[in-house]
Amino acid sequence: MTNLQQLKQWINESKSAVFFGGAGVSTESGIPDFRSVDGLYSQKFDYPPETIISHSFFERKPEYFFRFYREKMLPLGFEPNVTHKVLARLEAEGHLAAVVTQNIDGLHQKAGSKRVFELHGSVLRNYCVKCGKIHRAEVIRDAKGIPLCDCGGIIKPDVVLYEEPLDESVMAGAIAAIRRADLLIVGGTSLTVYPAAGLLHYYRGQRLVLINRDETPYDSYADLVFHESLGDIFSRL
């Protein structure tokens, strides 16, 4: 039996699988991994991405923060790819209990997934830091400089910046789903960003599957490992 046949069998037998995904899930929809530092990035920005998207930088230099955010982190107009669509189908068929994602683009929900734990928040949710009013992502996209609410407060994306804690209720839900899972599929993540990567330690099952182009620190713990793109694997599911 090939690894792919084994994966198909495990999925068919599963009643509470969980998919845990990172940036590699969305890059195949054309959304760049904002952490990658290429020539274009180095020409445009004077600070590392991790500095710009920190809480202290947001407070200190909000105009610069929003310039970076609009160009690198506001993926509007993109469509779900085959991985998003297959995961939504598996949930509808009763095999997949939840998706846990490090992505902030909302593409899992756009594909039809219902139970999604967004560890790092979502660009689709935005709120005024002064009055709490909710705003659409397009308000930030179309604003000149710092996006302001009617009350004069800054509109902040509901995404987790560096120096900010993850949402406790989201983490609790993700941990509970992973603990109950009879199959854990991890894809498109290097498993080096904590505390998200630490969620694997809560898995109690015997079927851990890793799908990532490059090796990860957890490859030796997995029961199946695919060093291929998610699109190649999920298009065959």
Image (cartoon, helix red, strand yellow):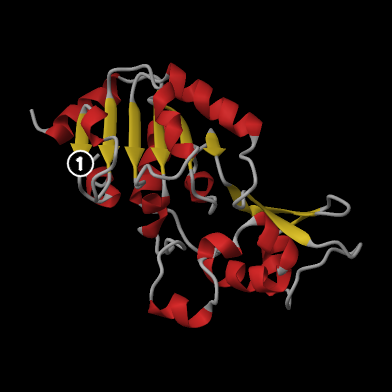
Measuring 60% from the left and 70% from the top, which residue is drawn there? Answer: 70
User: Would you name the residue on which mark 1 appears?
Assistant: 226
User: What is the residue that sits farthest to the right in this orientation?
Assistant: 151
Is 124 on the left-hand or right-hand side of 151? left
> Is residue 54 rendered to the left or right of residue 27?
right
Image quadrant of residue 20? top left
Along the viewing direction, whichever of 191 and 227 lies nearer the viewer? 191
Which residue occupies 51% across, 67% down? 48
Q: Residue at x 53, y 54 (%)?
A: 105
Instruction: Determine the secondary structure under disc 1.
Output: strand
Residue 159 image point, x, y percent: 63, 51
Query: Can you say which quadrant of the picture contains the C terminus?
Result: top left
Q: In the rendering, at what x and y percent does residue 152 appear? A: 89, 65
Q: Residue at the spot x=36%, y=41% of the render?
A: 86
Neighbour tally class for label 1: few under 14, some 14-19, many 20 plus, Cα within 10 Å: some
Q: Which image quarter holds the N terminus?
A: top left
The percent position of residue 53, horizontal first and vertical second, equals 60, 60
Between 85 and 146, the one lying in front of the other is: 146
Residue 222 visible in the shown view: no
Q: Is residue 97 visible?
A: yes
Give the residue furthest to the bottom.
Answer: 43
- Rendering coords of residue 85 (x, y %): 39, 45
The amino acid sitting under disc 1 is Phe
Q: Quadrant of residue 88?
A: top left
Quick one: which residue is furthest to the left in this view? 1
In the rendered picture of this protein, how many numbered marks are placed on residues? 1
Compared with 204, 40 (above or below) is: below
